[in-house]
Amino acid sequence: MKAKILIVDDDSDIVTMLEDRLQASDYGTVAAQDGVQALELIEQEAPHLMLLDLDMPRLTGLEVLKRLPKVRPAEDLPVIVMTAHGSIEAAVEAMKGGAYDFLTKPLDKDHLLLVISKALERDSLKRQVACLKSEVDSRYTSIIGTSPNIRTVMESAQRAARSDVGVLLLGESGTGKELFARSIHQWSPRCANPLVVINCVALTETLLENELFGHERGAFTGADRLQKGKLEMADGGTVFLDEIGDMPLPLQAKLLRVLQDREFHRVGGTRLVSVNIRVIAATNRDLKQAVKTGRFREDLFFRLNVITLTLPPLRERPDDLPLLAKFFLNRHAKEAKRPGMLFSPEAMKVMTHYAWPGNIRELDNVIARAVILSPTDTIEPDLLALDSGGLSRPESLTYISLPYHQSMEEHSRRIIDQALKYAEGNQTKAAERLRLQRTYLARLIKQQKLKQEGL
Ligand SMILES: Nc1ncnc2c1ncn2[C@@H]1O[C@H](COP(=O)(O)OP(=O)(O)OP(=O)(O)O)[C@@H](O)[C@H]1O
Ligand SMILES: [Mg+2]
């Protein structure tokens, strides 16, 4: 990626001279003739560095520096100020105001290039440090599992990470889709740039569109300044489209266009914005089925689905259960300042026989609760509260002995009971867990009650 430099000077000869020199050294350039325009371009063009003249009409260089934090964090954009020979005080003032370095006019070509490359190098070092730091942090929550099916997915994920292709993560709720998305970003050459998460179950289509594409100033009432969307913030990095199966159809069409052209308009805008992004998407829905029923665009499905990784449910990797359980126990015991906690052999047995419909997230929650509630350092089965209301392992399902509709009702009742139990009776939380509208869940519960009462 070429570094983009914003040149700000009211003297058009200097601007032209700088543009020529910088472009000859393979930098990209944008230019502003005054401070007001400079602030606009910082927002619109997201330059990597700014060369700023101090002595300008409308808004001086010092004033631009002062207003910079409002449009972009100062540490995010190295600024080199340019000042007339002999006005060192102004340069010192600018350095105090957050400038990285200064140059005196007339500009010396070699010195100019040296200062720019030093500033950019420092900026990229800073990003690398941030990247290494997040790698270290991620080791703390590294992917746990030695069973062959999770290892295979992990190896494919590592191979996929090295390329720039789209990855679609499938799997039940709580199987680790987000953890994998984050890991792929960290293993990829883009790791020094941002990973931006977009949850596609946003409230309305308009809100989601605004979140993706951003808006121009004046796009709608209340849009008093330009706002970048998440796609733009992810430039150079990765976009994680979570719950992609829930994206409204009209937005799917717009997203497809971005994925094809890597270009889009901000809401209310006419100018094309181009981005360099890698896309990872995830859903726990059956996307193929959604394509068949017309709820998901087939062309978008093929675009996202270059590499598909399907995460196995926890019940299909029982060998990993003790490993994961101990990992979460250590973590929660440490947080609760109760080191040395253990599972009793019976507790371990109950956990290995449970079906974990909520997968690893459920395991994590169950253990977190047990650590808090356990009166002793040994966690006993009753504290896990897994037997009653929980689904048993598939092989022990007995519903087949019931007629189909009755069996489905029984199944539905158990799932709702269990969700309510984990939500401690709170219907809103239970509905969230089941991904149902609260009102719909309330209706289901009422129907079940009526049936039980024989009405
Ligand atoms: N292999 C693993 N090792 C350690 N922790 C894991 C593993 N897989 C998942 N987790 C943890 O389990 C929790 C759930 O994972 P995650 O949020 O990635 O699931 P998900 O598939 O995105 O779920 P949902 O579909 O509900 O959004 C997280 O806290 C995550 O860190
Ligand atoms: Mg998730």
Image (cartoon, rainbow, N blue to C red):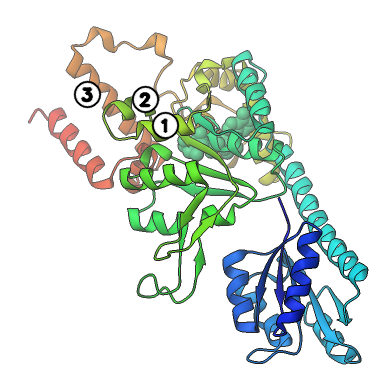
Q: Residues within 10 Å of mark 3 (few under 14, many from 20)?
A: some
Residue 398 percent across, percent down from the top left: 31, 10
Residue 244 percent across, percent down from the top left: 42, 39
Task: Please tell me whether mark 2 sits on a helix, a strand or a loop.
Answer: helix
On whether ligand 1 comes within 8 Å of the CB at mark 3, the answer is no
Task: Please tell me whether mark 1 sits on a helix, a strand or a loop.
Answer: helix
Question: Is the Cβ of the residue at disc 2 closer than 8 Å to that at disc 1?
Answer: yes
Q: Amino acid at mark 3?
A: Glu
Q: Amino acid at mark 1?
A: Phe
Q: Is residue 409 above or below residue 229?
A: above
Residue 393 percent across, percent down from the top left: 43, 15
- Residue 95 or 10: which is nearer the viewer? 10
User: What residue did someone put label 2 on?
Assistant: 288
Task: Please tell me whether mark 3 sits on a helix, a strand or a loop.
Answer: helix
- Residue 23 or 101: which is nearer the viewer? 23
Q: Viewer-nearest of labels 1 and 3?
A: 1
Quarter of the view holding residue 62: bottom right
Question: What is the C-alpha distance between the residues marked 2 and 1?
Answer: 8 Å
Residue drawn where x is 39% and y is 25% of the image? 388
- Mark 1 or 3, nearer chain start: 1
User: What residue did someone put label 1 on?
Assistant: 301
User: What residue did someone put label 3 on?
Assistant: 409
- Residue 451 or 441: which is nearer the viewer? 441
In the image, 376: left or right of 399? right
Q: Residues within 10 Å of mark 2 (few under 14, many from 20)?
A: some
